[in-house]
Amino acid sequence: MSRGLFVTGAGTGVGKTLIACALVHRLRARGEAVRVLKPVATGFDGADAESDTALLLAAAGEPASPEAIAACTPWRFGPALAPAMAAAREGRAIPYDDLIGHCRAALDGEAFTIIEGIGGVMVPLGGGRTVADWIAALGIPAVLVAGSYLGALSHALTALAAARAAGIPVAGLVVSESEESPVPLAETVGALRDHAAGIPILAVPRLAPGPHPWERAPDLTGLFR
């Protein structure tokens, strides 16, 4: 099994955190030691118990203490913007070499590491680099998360093409059902399958509301085991 997996998306709000948490939950249920990283976050409110970072830590069985948040998400920005823009608003920048080094240090450990990116696969990080460059530099497989809203097919296939162009090994494509979907989830999966030869596609339907929804998600670990 690979030492880690990078969860990225076809855009923002498609369900990356849910899928990352579902993977963490299943791995831990099998007795795996798991580490979670969400290295870059924008729109960050340290008191938000529903932040991506807090949810990932909950799935990993860790309290969202200041120390755990800092280790999981070292680069946190207040403005809810693309990371390069959010950093610039605060007079800061994302130190790319430090970002890669932080992730590699986790990947070199004994625990299997789930890394959640930010936004879509082509989101700018600054300095001419994107999330795709970040994933490629780590050399680990990616899971691409897409929605099922109107327009999701183009967004998913564009993101997949970008990942392939960057040389990123895509372990699988997960379609996380959007709140408003024009067609049944199976039709979206079928349409994507025609253009994603050789890449497993799994569907995650809308989950019933309640705490820890990732515990009710299908087992996705077959994508990389």
Image (cartoon, rainbow, N blue to C red):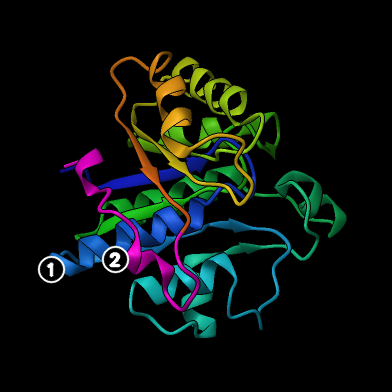
Q: Relative to residue 151, is residue 69 drawn left or right?
A: left
For the stretch drawn in magenta, the main secondary structure is loop
In the rendered view, would you say 174 is above or below 54?
A: above
Q: Position of residue 45 (x, y in %)?
A: 70, 74
Local crowd size for mark 2, using a 10 Å CA cut-off: few (<14), some (14–19), many (≥20): many
Report the amino acid beneath label 2: His
Q: Find disc 1 in the rendering and name its residue.
A: 31
The image quadrant where one finds the C terminus is top left
Q: How many marks?
A: 2
Q: Nearer the viewer, residue 91 or 131?
A: 131
Residue type marked 1: Gly
SS type, badge 2: helix
- Say which label, 2 or 1, has the lower sequence index: 2
SS at mark 1 in the image: loop
Disc number for residue 199: none
Q: Which residues are magenta?
A: 207-225
Q: Quadrant of residue 170?
A: top left
Q: Position of residue 212 (x, y in %)?
A: 42, 74
Image depth: mark 2 or mark 1 in front? 2
Q: CA distance from mark 2 to mark 1?
A: 10 Å
Residue drawn at (29%, 47%), measured in percent from left and top?
Answer: 4
Please tell me whether residue 22 belongs to the stretch shown in magenta. no
User: Which residue, given by chain and number where applicable, does mark 2 sit on?
Assistant: 25
Name the residue located 58 percent from the left edge and 80 percent from the top edge.
49
Relative depth, front residue between 78 and 147: 147
